[in-house]
Image (tube, helix red, strand yellow):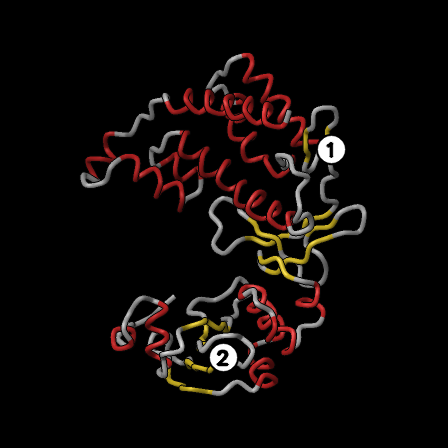
Amino acid sequence: MAARIATVLSDSRHRMDQRIDRRRIEWPRWYFHQNPNVRGDRVARVTVATRSPEDAARAGIGPDPIIRRTVRNSLHTSLFDGVATAVRSLAPHPFGSITWYGQQEAHRVAYYDIYRSFGLMTFGREDNELLDIQSALVESTGWWWAFDDIAVMSERPTALHTEPIPDPVHGEVRLHNSSSPAVEFGDGSGVHVLNGTVVPKWVIHDPTVERITVERNVEIRRSAIERMGWDAYLDRAGLRLVDTDDDPGNPGCTLQLFATPAGWGDEGRILLAVNGSRERDGERRRYGLRVPGAFSSAVDAAGWTYGLAGADYGRLLRRT
């Protein structure tokens, strides 16, 4: 049954995609006179990815790339990449059947439905019926699984806590809650997430040097250190300072290169730097980067993170 449903839905999406792909986008002649070396499709990708839908439309971009970026891609980032990934950590072992993600598949349904709702495209009767069914599922259920005789459907989250992703253009968000689960369900279960990274409960409520040392996941380790604070972590972990220098790409700030602590399982280094741009709260965050253990110069290590030699990095006027 699950395979049959998957095939029916896949075939329907393929038919609707074909109809949409056959649309002809009209580009304004004046734009290409002013930009003779830029192809239309590249103009669409760059403009829609970096500007609001209104600005993209005023620049002469047709509806198709705007809808793809502002509806399908942005919802995919917020719901599927974000929420579905977090919920998956609660159910690491699937039922042995195909999983549909209900509410978190809204990016697929909304993409086709907006064409239909605004009269931009007409689909066949079968595809319209399937789209209606999928819309109802998105509005009413969480993850679900289909078997020969029964369907298993789960409740949707009762609470989601989010923050905007860095420099969002189309309202994209990521999960974040620094005091309790970012995703919560009615049965009391939940998932802790910091700045989009799924983390164990201890990262938020009790980060310690000992737990950080034995943690094998680099992103969880980074989140725990930032939760504790780099100054506190460096003091408690007793990391050995290898080199320190002024940051030539960030005037007034310092680069520090530390040996990784025992227990991390490698001979790498940690480069501690200050962000070149301010966070949303106006502060400039200190952050640590993993760099190869061969570096003994903090400037060389900083250059490596940008794909530059240390001498070239030293000539930067400003980094971001």
Location of residue 69 (image quadrant): top left
Could one spot residue 54 in this view of the protein?
Answer: yes
Left or right: where does residue 211 sit relative to residue 119? right
Is 5 drawn above or below residue 280 in the view shown? above
Mark 1: amino acid = Val
Q: Quadrant of the C terminus?
A: bottom left
Please give the label number shown on residue 152.
Answer: 1
Q: CA distance from mark 2 to mark 1?
A: 47 Å
Left or right: where does residue 228 sit relative to residue 47? right
Q: Position of residue 128 (x, y in %)?
A: 56, 17
Residue occupied by mark 2: 260
Q: Position of residue 153 (x, y in %)?
A: 73, 34
Dot 1 falls on a residue whose secondary structure is strand
Left or right: where does residue 146 sit relative to residue 105? right
Dot 2 falls on a residue whose secondary structure is loop
Is 50 drawn above or below residue 108 in the view shown? below
Earlier-in-chain disc, 2 versus 1: 1
For image coordinates 63% across by 50% down, the residue present is 86
Mark 2: amino acid = Thr
Could one spot residue 100 in this view of the protein?
Answer: no
Q: Position of residue 147 (x, y in %)?
A: 69, 28
For image coordinates 33% across by 33% down, the residue present is 60
For disc 2, the neighbor class at 10 Å (few under 14, some 14 to 19, many from 20) is many
